Image (spheres, helix red, strand yellow):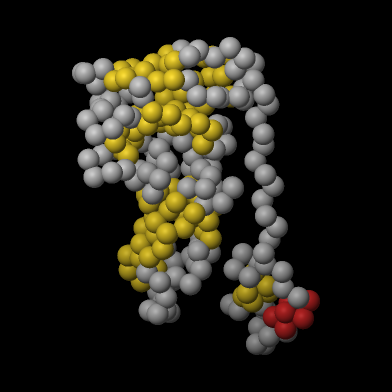
Amino acid sequence: MTITTSRSPVTTQPSINRAVHGQYVRDSGYNSDGSLATWFNATMDQMGNGTVTEVRIPAIWLFTLLDGPCAGTGRATIGEDVTGDAILPCENIFHPHRISFTPIATDAQAPPATFTISGEGIDASYAMPLIEFYDEYGRLTASTYATAVASDGTSLTSSMPNLPYTNFYAVGVSNALSGGGMDLIGATSVQVTNGQELPPLPDPPPDECNPTSQDIANCENCCGVQTYWDYSSCRCYIP
């Protein structure tokens, strides 16, 4: 099975190198192998994808993002299709606070020393809030902590991190929790101009399914029925 994550709270591109938890819910067929794993933690690759093997299928599974500004908000299920995709949207659906970033745009060659985020629900009870900046490919470019928070929770101030590329950066704000960890409370964006060109994503890795010509011949001559080599599952398909 393959899991695909979306990136930041306000965009829809892949999230990179994020952790995902998978939890088995129930079987959805008669051939599920009860000896295989019923949960896993996996890290997405440079394309925001992850492939999991040796888990109990066909079955219904629940997936949840574990880290980043979307932690806990991307949930999806996958069913009977062993090689199916589960797309985990980062929708910020559990955190309704609206926030805004000042200045709304900045020059990479002459950035301001500080920035301000305004809104509601900003809380420094357990530690200063965390601010994370994601580029248009979902890569975490910079992060910083607030240096000051208004007593009524309506604003924070922080030092401007280095944002070297011309880009619209998605910005996530998270409060510290009493038991550790962070809780995303809102998202906004900031435009950076006059910077370097944003590096593209690396090319995806080559297909790891490389059957030999004998494997394919054995498959196509198998079983007295029309068969073919299924590259998505890397095995002989027998109808």
Examine the rendering and report whether any part of residue 95 can be seen: no
Report the residue at 26% width, 17% height from top: 150
Furthest residue toward bottom: 224
Locate residue 5 relative to residue 213 in the image: left or right: left
Locate residue 184 relative to residue 166 in the image: left or right: left
Furthest residue toward right: 213
**Residue 195, x across and y down, in percent:** 64, 20
**Residue 47, x across and y down, in percent:** 59, 47
Q: Based on the displayed image, in which of its 4 quarters is residue 27 positioned? A: bottom left
**Residue 183, x across and y down, in percent:** 31, 38
Quarter of the C terminus within the rendering: bottom right
Front-most of residues 237 and 85: 85
Q: Is residue 6 above or below residue 228?
A: above
Report the residue at 49% width, 54% height from top: 43
Report the residue at 60% width, 24% height from top: 164
Report the residue at 50% width, 12% height from top: 112
Q: Is residue 204 above or below residue 191?
A: below
**Residue 237, x across and y down, in percent:** 62, 75
Front-most of residues 214 and 41: 41
